[in-house]
Structure formats: C-alpha cells, structure tokens
Image (spheres, rainbow, N blue to C red):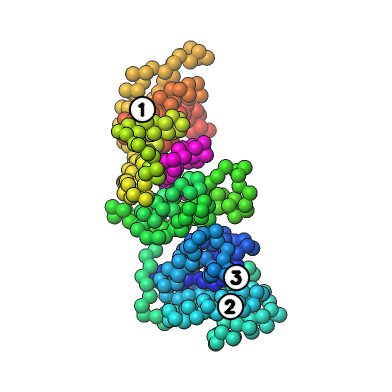
Amino acid sequence: MIQGIVAIVGRPNVGKSTIFNKMTRTTQALIDDRPGVTRDRLYGTVESVFNEEDGFVLVDTGGFETDDLYYQPFAKNIVWEQTETAIRDADVVLMVFDAKAGLHPHDRQLVQFLKELNKDVVYIVNKVDGPEHEVLSWDFYELGIEKFHMCSAAHSRGLWEVCENIETHLRQREDLKAVKPRDPEATKIALIGRPNAGKSSILNRLCGEERSLVSEVAGTTRDPVDTAIIYNKKPYLLLDTAGIRRRKKIFDKIEGLSVMRALRAIEDADVVIIVTSADEGLSDQDCRLASLAAEKYKPVLIVVNKWDLIPDKETNTARDYESTIHDKLKDIAYAPVLFTSCIENQRIHRIMAVVEELAESYRKRVPTARINDSLQRAILEHTPALVKRYNKRVKFYFATQVSVCPPTIVIKCNVADEIQESYKRYLVKRFRSELEFGKVPLRVFFRDKAEEKEKREWGS
C-alpha cells in the first residue's frame, strides 16, 4: 500500500533532486551543478524498506529562495509557492542541508518556517561523502536540532537509513493522507509544443489546480510534470513537457536535456497534443513534432491556444485557419484541430472529449468480415493498376486486424512489393473512413500469400 506523502525541501543545490532520483530509483529529476534547476513539484514512489508491497510518495521541490538570493528569472517567486504547497500537503518533510556549504541563514529561516507549521521533519546533512567529512555537520547543531542523518546522495551513502526513519515517522501518524496508486491502464497524454505556447496553462485548467508553473518567461517548464485525472470515470495521465525549439537555437545543457525528455514523452504517450499559439500559427517545428508523433503511430490533436489574440474574427476564421493547418500537415491532415483560450476558458473542456474519442479509436478492433467488405468495395470502385512486370493486376485475398494501439491491418495478396504507394494510401484512407477509425493513424501491411506459405513449409 502506498501511504503517506514526503516533501524534500532545502536551499538550491543541496542535492534534493539527487536524493529524489536515488530514493525513487529513477532519473525523473534533472540534475546539474548550477542552482535553481528544479522548478515544478515532481512526484515519485519509494518502495518500503520493510515490505516491497508498501511505500510512500516522495515530492521533489524547488530550492528555498528569497529576494537577496534568487536564481529564477520570474518576477514573482512562483517556485517557492509550489514548494510551500508541497510542504503543507506533506505528512513528513525531509529537510536537506549541504555539509560542504555549511550553515546558511536561509537554513535557519526554513527550519523556523517548518517549526511554525508544526510539521513532522526528518533532517539530513547531505554531501558527507565519508567518515572524514562528518565533522562538517557539527555546525548544524546550532539550529537546536537533536538528530541529523549524515548521508551522501551521490554515493548512496546512508540513504536507506533515512528511508527507514521516514517510514518510522509515517507509521507513528494516524492521519496519513490517502494516496491512490496510479492506474497502469491510464491513457497517457503528452502536451508537446514550442516554449510559451500555453501547455502548462492547459494542464492546470484540465486538472483544476496550479499543478504546473505558469509565467510569461519562455522555457519555464523543465522537468516533465505528470498529473493523474479522471474523466468520464476513466483514468488519464497528463504530462506537461518543456517547450521544444529548433536544435540550432538550443545552447543550454538543461534545455537540451528537457527537450530530450519531451521527445521521449511522445514515445510513451497514447495521445499527443501539439499546442501552438494562435498569433504565431503552426510553425515548421510544430509540423515536425506532429510528423514525429505520426511516425510513431500516435494519435495527434492540434490545439490552437490563445485564440483570444486573433482580432476581428468572422464566421469562417476558424475554418480557414484549420484549412491552413491541414495543408501544412499533409499526410496527417486527418488530425483534429481545436481552438482554445486559457485566459477566457474557451473550449478547454472539449480537449478531454476529443482525447477520449482518439483513445477509443486507437484501441478499437474491427471484425474481419467488415474489413474484407470494405476492401472489396474499395477494389470495385478503384481497381489497382496493371503490374507490367508480371502483366497482371494485384489480387487481394483477404484482410484482418492483427493488433490495436495502433490499429494494424494485414492484407494478403499475390504481389505485395508491386503495389503502388498511391494505391496503398487510397486503401488506408478508405479503411480509416469506412471502419470508423476516426482521426488516428492506421498501420496497414501488405503480405505475399506465397511467401507466407513458403515460410510455413520451411518451419514445418
């Protein structure tokens, strides 16, 4: 059972994200020597040291910053707001100090803040790489704290004793917050797009809370932020990702790592939402992202955000805009387009409805008889061209759906290698329309029946 929430807090660059990754046994949090890398709250699960079936939720947060020591580019300290939310929600707080940097006035402020909230706190002094460095932790006894855990997250030294102590604190509490484990069958939705297109604002609207940081500064989101929601009694997992710019415009190491994780999110997703800004239009970069998702056979939804910025809209404005998008998308012109505005809360509610339709089509299975009926009608209406090499036409025997996610159809014929690409596209388009696969990518394979027979004979 996953029970209890533990928030990691401390000054910037004391090793919170390293501790998070080590305890959760993941590489979810970005790690760098510079301070202020982590901004959003990151959630992970830590297995119990007593029982593999038990555990607790661990939350990584941004560093404690004030006006005199501030690493973020935002006019308002929104990172601390996220951290404060995590602290107030937590059952136990893991306060981290930096042994090599020594005691800092901000450490005193944060300890005092936790005492005022009357939080249950486990204190650890990080970066104690060996017994010879334990003397560095003596300064922290000035804070009036009786017990510290000395550890080195980078070398996994002393961390499991910390986990054991955390679980002891959790077991002593009777008011632990209930934590529902994430449904492994949840539909994964990745929000992808350029910086400052409104991905985080959309995530916050859909989940009903300020889950992800939002600012006018491009590139605010760094780590992928995932949030579980329920829509129409079905589980979904929303994933907000960093903005993706063209490769030649990326000079920062952290941005490069963020972009790599955003691209990886496309592979892991069941549905990909490409978010673009209405005033900037669908760029070549957006088209490349949509094509990348289509190459992975992922359903794509184009969300044109900031629709309120388009002046003097008329009846056909949205229709003409959508037509322009489909002209740019070419081979994936079947992707649905939705016009939204987070500022005015326009059509945000429609996003999940469209996602649900795409997910259902992505998992849809069609009876073989219906597929063959559609194939026969397509052949009668448009006969394949004559194959000059064999002086005969392609003969189709039968078709069947072999898998879902993506829906995959195999067609057996006599000369699969000689079918024209234009005729293959024609059949795919007919299948998508007549078999009601909607607006999701459809994979169709053509196989020679003679080759299949030869394989069976060799394998017998």
Q: Residue, x 38% and y 75% (percent of image)?
A: 176
Do the CB atoms of the residues marked 1 and 3 lie less than 8 Å apart? no
Q: Which amino acid, by three-letter code, is at mark 2?
A: Pro
Residue hosting label 3: 14
Asked if disc 3 and disc 2 are in contact, CB closer than 8 Å, the reply is no
Q: Earlier in the sequence, mark 2 or mark 1?
A: 2
Residue occupied by mark 1: 430
SS state under label 1: helix
Question: Compared to 431, does 241 lie above or below?
Answer: below
Task: Choose between 460 and 136: the one closer to the eye.
Answer: 136
Image coords of residue 425 (percent x, y)? 43, 26
The residue at which mark 2 appears reads as: 105
Closer to the camera in the image, 421 or 281: 281
User: Amino acid under label 1?
Assistant: Arg
Quarter location, residue 5: bottom left
How many residues crowd around disc 1 within 10 Å: few (fewer than 14), some, or many (20 or more)?
A: some
Q: Could you say whether the residue bearing mark 3 is in a helix, strand or loop? A: loop
x 55%, y 58%: residue:
73
Residue at horizontal 53%, vertical 70%?
66
Residue 159, image quadrant: bottom right
Q: Position of residue 17 (x, y in %)?
A: 56, 65
Q: Amino acid at mark 3?
A: Val
Q: Nearer the observer, disc 2 or disc 1? A: 2
Residue 129 visible: yes
User: Mark 3 Cα within 10 Å, few/some/many (few <14, many 20+)?
Assistant: many
Which region of the structure is painted magenta? 267-296
Q: Is residue 219 left or right of residue 359?
A: right
* Mark 3 or mark 2: whose residue is earlier in sequence: 3
